[in-house]
């Protein structure tokens, strides 16, 4: 059989990206003499594109449809996997665009449960899965697509046990399933052995890792064991759900030398009535206690959060409370989201919906504040550290400049630095290459 050139597009989610890496690893290892992989899915010679989709909110599904149209216009076959597929196939959701892809012979639907048994010939012949159950774990091999950037993701759990009223992820991905500690430690060692300099632990709710296996959360026990792995590396944790995060646990982190003090804590709001309607089990005093502890006990830290604007019932006072909270400048990065009224989410049934025009007005007001705060932080970092050594990883090399991700900043989320070559003070690799760990001045 002549070589077939395939490619991959992964929309939005790093947890889906890990699934994509395992699927690629399986296909490339099982069909080594038949397949070639291209990093550019729109290259003319690419025939089949695996599209891992997002179904969490309508904008993610819209991006899927746009991407499908673009690929089909270039006469490529498309294989759909991921959350949007689960949204339509498992949950039976319908909308005006679903039918445009359901009966297209150039589009395959692949369930997460098929990834261990799928063959290349099935993908080429329009495979249509009928088993859209909850997400499961995949065995190796895994294609590591981020090693050239010095990091890889370590997915520690799948699914979610929370019942946030605005979220349909538990319906799409199922209840939480944690990977056992020994298996995760082996995967971490595999990634480090192959050259990863940073591990990024991910899950829907990392704070609850292990509760399904061990009867209680085991995240910090996992981190303690990762801490003792012998390689020269660092690690961070994404999505620390705040309701069961304790000061005792945070205090423990202060003794971990390889831990990157990056705190990704999705608060979503500050007003107690809105938090209750969201199904969030913490309040304003607990939030301030948590944030002040981080600021006090981690002299170097990075705090990121998510905020939803215009949730049903959000009054002017609620929004003013949120605005005042954000203005206190606790955060190094903030993701702002306008409320999306998802038909399958519990919040869809709530009364007192906020008019779209008012949501947009509040969003613009808060976005303007956030932009001012983050710009001031960026300027302060540049001015206060102009004579101090920075550390980071090379992301791109131009003719006269380097793009560097500061070591504290998370890939694909936080700001990057662009510097001239002469600002580099030292490098772990000679000559400089993508992924090199460097010291530099701003």
Image (cartoon, grey):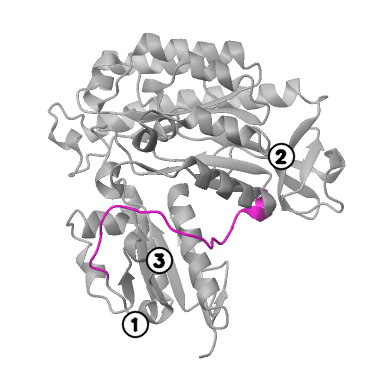
Q: Can the viewer see residue 95 in this picture?
A: yes
The stretch in magenta equals: 129-150
Identify the residue position indicated by label 1 in the image: 125
Between label 3 and label 2, give the one nearer the viewer: 2
Return the x and y of residue 398 as percentages of the image width and height.
75, 54
What predominant SS class does the magenta segment belong to?
loop
Earlier in the chain: of badge 3 and badge 2, it is 3
Earlier in the chain: of badge 1 and badge 3, it is 3
Return the x and y of residue 80 as percentages of the image width and height.
35, 65
Q: Secondary structure at mark 3?
A: loop
Is the C-beta separation of discs 1 and 3 under 8 Å?
no
Judging depth in this view, the residue of 269 and 32 nearest the camera is 32
Between label 2 and label 1, give the one nearer the viewer: 2
Q: Is residue 417 magenta?
A: no
Q: Is residue 141 magenta?
A: yes
Identify the residue position indicated by label 2 in the image: 230
Residue 338 placement: quadrant: top left
The CA span between labels 3 and 2 is 32 Å
Identify the residue position indicated by label 3 in the image: 116
Judging depth in this view, the residue of 353 and 2 nearest the camera is 2
């Amino acid at each position: 059989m002549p070589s077939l050139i395939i490619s991959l597009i992964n929309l939005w989610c790093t947890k889906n990206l890990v699934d994509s890496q395992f699927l690629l690893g399986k296909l490339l290892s099982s069909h080594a003499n038949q397949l070639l992989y291209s990093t550019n899915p729109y290259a003319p010679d690419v025939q089949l594109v695996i599209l891992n989709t997002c179904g969490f909110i309508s904008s993610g599904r819209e991006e899927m449809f746009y991407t499908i149209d673009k690929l089909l216009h270039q006469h490529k076959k498309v294989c759909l996997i991921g959350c949007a597929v689960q949204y339509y196939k498992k949950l039976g959701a319908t909308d005006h665009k679903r039918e445009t892809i359901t009966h297209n012979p150039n589009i395959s639907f692949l369930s997460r449960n098929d990834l261990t048994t799928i063959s290349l010939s099935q993908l080429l012949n329009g495979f249509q899965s009928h088993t859209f159950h909850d997400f499961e774990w995949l065995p190796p091999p895994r294609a590591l697509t981020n090693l050239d950037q010095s990091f890889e993701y370590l997915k520690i759990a799948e699914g979610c046990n929370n019942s946030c009223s605005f979220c349909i992820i538990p319906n799409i991905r199922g209840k939480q399933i944690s990977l056992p500690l020994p298996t995760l430690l082996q995967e971490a060692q595999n990634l480090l052995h192959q050259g990863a300099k940073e591990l990024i632990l991910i899950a829907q709710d990392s704070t609850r890792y292990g509760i399904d296996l061990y009867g209680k959360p085991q995240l910090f026990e996992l981190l303690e064991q990762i801490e003792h792995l012998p390689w020269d590396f660092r690690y961070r944790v994404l999505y620390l759900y705040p309701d069961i995060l304790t000061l005792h646990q945070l205090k423990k982190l202060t003794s971990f030398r390889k831990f990157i003090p990056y705190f990704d804590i999705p608060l979503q709001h500050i007003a107690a009535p809105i938090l209750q309607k969201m199904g969030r089990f913490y309040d304003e005093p607990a939030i301030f206690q948590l944030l002040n502890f981080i600021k006090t006990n981690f002299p170097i830290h990075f705090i990121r959060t998510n905020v939803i604007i215009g949730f049903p019932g959000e009054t002017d006072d609620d929004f003013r409370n949120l605005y005042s909270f954000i203005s206190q400048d606790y955060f190094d990065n903030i993701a702002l989201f306008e409320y999306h009224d998802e038909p399958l989410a519990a919040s869809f049934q709530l009364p007192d919906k906020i008019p779209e025009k008012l949501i947009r007005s509040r969003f613009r007001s808060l976005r303007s504040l956030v932009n001012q705060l983050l710009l001031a932080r960026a300027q302060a970092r540049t001015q206060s550290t102009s004579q101090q050594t920075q550390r980071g990883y090379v992301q791109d090399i131009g003719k006269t400049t380097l793009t560097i991700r500061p070591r504290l900043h998370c890939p694909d989320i936080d700001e990057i630095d662009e510097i001239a070559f002469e600002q580099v003070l030292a490098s772990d690799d000679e000559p400089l290459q993508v992924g090199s760990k460097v010291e530099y001045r701003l």
